[in-house]
Image: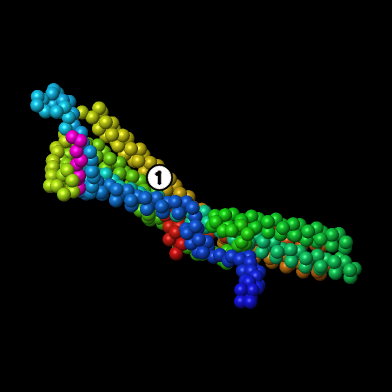
Amino acid sequence: MTSRLSLILALALVPCALAQDAAPLKLTLHDAVAMALQKNPLVILANLSVGQSHQDVRVARSALLPQGVGTLGESAHRINIDTAFGSAIPGFPQHLGPFDVFQTGVEFNATIFDLTLWHRYHSSQAGVTAARAQEMTVREESVLLVVSQYLGSQRAAADVAAAQSRVELAQALYDQAADLQKNGVGTGIDTLRANVQLQNEKQRLIVARTQLQTSLFGLARLLNIDPQRSIELADQVQFFQTPEISADQTLAHAYSTRPELRQIAAQQHQAELALRTAKDARLPTVTATGVWVEQGLGPTSVIPVYQYEGDLNIPLFTGGRIRAEQAKAELAIRQLQQQEQETRNRIALEVKTAIAQLDSARNEVTVANLGIDLARQEVEQARDRFQAGVANNIEVITAQDELARASDNQIAALYRYNQSRAGLAHAAGQMEALYGK
C-alpha cells in the first residue's frame, strides 16, 4: 500500500516538474556572461590547458631531483668460462653453474650540474603564464560573443515592442477613420489607407517577433542551454552615460592588460630560454649514480653489495644538433617579435576605432531621441487635423511612417552605442571586468 501511494504521488508530481522545466529562463546580461564562462566548451578546454601546464612544471622539476628505485629479484645464472676468458682454463670445467642469485636494495641517480635542465624548468613555468594568458583571451572572446548576442536580442525585443506600439497606433487611426466615414465626415479612401497601414504594421510585427526568436535561439546556443527551454531577457535596452575617453590612456591600458600581449611575452621568454638551453648544451654535465643491494645465493646468505659512480660528460660532437637548436630558437624569437608588433598595431587600431564609434553612437542617440519626440508631435498634429476635417489622412499615414523610421533609428542608435561600449571594453581587455562582475 505504501509503495502504491508513493508511485501515485510520483506520477502526480511529474506534470509539475515538466511545467517547472518548461518555464522560461530569465537572464540578465550578467547571468548570461557568468553562464558562458562556466559552460562554454572553449573556456573549459583553455582551463584544462592551464592544468596541463602546471603538470609540465612538475615533470620538468622532477628532472632536477634525485631519482630512486627499489629492487627485489631472483635470477638464475650459468656462465661459459671459455667464452668469458677467451680460452679454456686447464683444470676448470667449461661452465660455472647453474646457480641462483637473490638481491634486494635501491638504485638512485641524481644530476649534479646540468644547466639545460634548469632552463627547461623555467621554460615550463613560463608555459603556465602563457596558458593563463591564452585562457584569458578565450574568456574575453567568449564574453564578447555573449554580450553581442544579448545586445542583439535586446534590439530585437525593442523592435517587437516598437512594432506592437505601431500596430496599436495604426489600429486607433483606422478606428478613427472608420468612425468619421460612418458619421459621413470621412471618405472611404481614408479608411482604406488606414487599413493598409494597419496591415503593414502587423506584418512588421510578425517579422520583428521572428527576429527576436531567432536571436534568442542564437543566445541559447552560445550558453549551451537545452533547445526546449525558452529564454526571456531580464534587462532592457538602456543608455549608459560614459565620460570622455582619452585614446592615449586607453591604449596604454590596453597594452598592459590585453592577454594576447601577455601570452606573446611569455612565449618570448620561453624562446629565450630555449636559446640559452641550446647554448648551454655545450657545457659539461655532472651526474651521480649508485646501487646498494643485499645480494647472495639465497635470502639467508645475502651480504651488502654496492656501487657508486660519478660521471663528467663533455659534448664533443653532436652532428650539428646544438647549432640547429640555436638557429631554431633565434628564428622563434624573431617570429614572436614580429607577432608582437603586429598585435600592438592591431590593438591600437581596435582602440581608436572603438573610441570613434562610441563618440559617434553617443551623438546618434541624442539625435535619435530628438527625432522620435518630433515624430510623435507630428503624428498628434496630423491626427488633430484629420479629426477636424482640414486634411485627409495622407498626412497621418506619412506621420506614421516618419514615427516608425524615428523609432527604428532610436533602437539602432541605442544598440550601436551599447555595442560600441562592448567593443571598447574588448579593445582595452576589460570585457570580463565590465560584464562579468
Instruction: Specify the quadrant of the image occupied by residue 101.
Output: top left
Q: Tell me which secondary structure the magenta stretch mostly adopts.
A: strand
Q: Is residue 395 left or right of residue 299?
A: right
The front one of 37 and 168 is 37
Task: Judge by depth and name the residue closer to the eye, 232 or 20.
Answer: 20
Q: Quadrant of the N terminus?
A: bottom right
Left or right: 241 in relation to 2? left
The answer to which of 148 and 146 lies nearer the viewer is 146
Marks counted in the figure total 1
Q: Residue at x 17, y 25 (%)?
A: 83
Residue 350, given in percent of the width and then of the height, sits at 45, 49
Mark 1 crowdedness (10 Å alpha carbons): few <14, some 14-19, many ≥20 = some
- The residue type indicated by label 1 comes to Thr
Task: Return the residue found at the far left.
Answer: 91
What span is colored magenta in the figure? 97-109
Residue at which label 1 appears? 343
Residue 350 covered by magenta stretch: no
Q: In the structure shown, which secondary structural element does the residue marked by tag 1 occupy?
A: helix
